[in-house]
Image (spheres, rainbow, N blue to C red):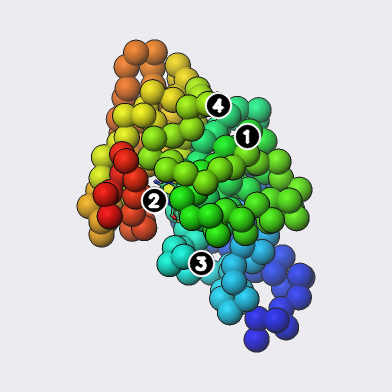
Amino acid sequence: MSSTYTNRQFDLARQQLVSLLRGKGITDTRVLDAIAAVPRHVFIQEVFRHRAYEDSALPIACQQTISQPYTVAFMTQLLQIRRGEKVLEIGTGSGYQACILAEMGARVFTIERHFDLLETARQRFEELGYNIASKVGDGSIGWSQFAPYAGIIVTAGAPDVPPSLLRQLDESGRLVIPVGDQSTQSMIVVERQGEEFVHTKSAGFKFVPLLGKEGWRK
Ligand code: SAH
């Protein structure tokens, strides 16, 4: 039963997850170190907690999901963020991805459309000692107040790359976003090089939809 798991068992399971991710091709040690440091079980409901270190997405409140660890690692690796840089995350969900970025030394800003999810995520940020700025709102239009960002990561599947997000990247900023239809998406990286935006595309994924003004209209 989940409640009988000890912290030591969770620590061991987390180390095994890190080895698994390394085996699946995650090479950035800063990403792997962050996954080794952030207790994913804290972000997961009691009933699923015994599965916290499986490499799978799990249900959270409001019919949403915490992303699969591989997806978190893959996207974070694509973001290529350095300590002290500003990162905007769209889709706070459980708060796990935001904590991974904070653990890596990024200055994290995160937006969630569900108030209930954000409230729970905020409690976790505080409990774990991460200083993360967050708000409830439509993240498909970004968070212009604190722009520009060195990195923007969208953790929900979008119909297209929202132009507002491109405008909020700094001169050499990177946007990582799953784009496709509502069932499958490709991971897109848009790298700003001054006035140019260079797009690259990789593997297929499955995300919950990005709703909003520059997302899906439901
Ligand atoms: N990064 C999260 C994964 C959450 S799933 C984690 O680590 O747990 C994606 C989240 O995006 C959902 O919580 C959903 O409510 C949110 N979302 C969808 N469209 C959004 C929008 N336009 N603005 C902000 N959040 C959005």
Q: Are marks 1 and 2 in contact (CB under 8 Å)?
A: no
Q: Is residue 187 visible?
A: no
The residue positioned 31% from the left and 29% from the top of the image is: 163
Residue 61 image label: 3
Q: Residue furthest top?
A: 194
Disc 2 marks a residue whose amino acid type is Ala
The front one of 177 and 145 is 145
Q: Amino acid at mark 4?
A: Phe
Mark 1 → mark 2, Cα distance in angstroms? 20 Å
Circle 3: residue type: Ala
- Read off the residue under disc 2: 156
Residue occupying image coordinates x 65% and y 86%: 1
Residue beneath disc 1: 106
> Which one is earlier in the sequence, the residue at label 3 or at label 1?
3
Residue sitting at x 69%, y 56%? 123
The numbered mark at residue 146 is: 4
Q: Is residue 18 left or right of residue 123?
A: left
Q: Please provide percent x and percent y for residue 108.
A: 60, 37
* Cα distance in 3D space between marks 4 and 1: 14 Å
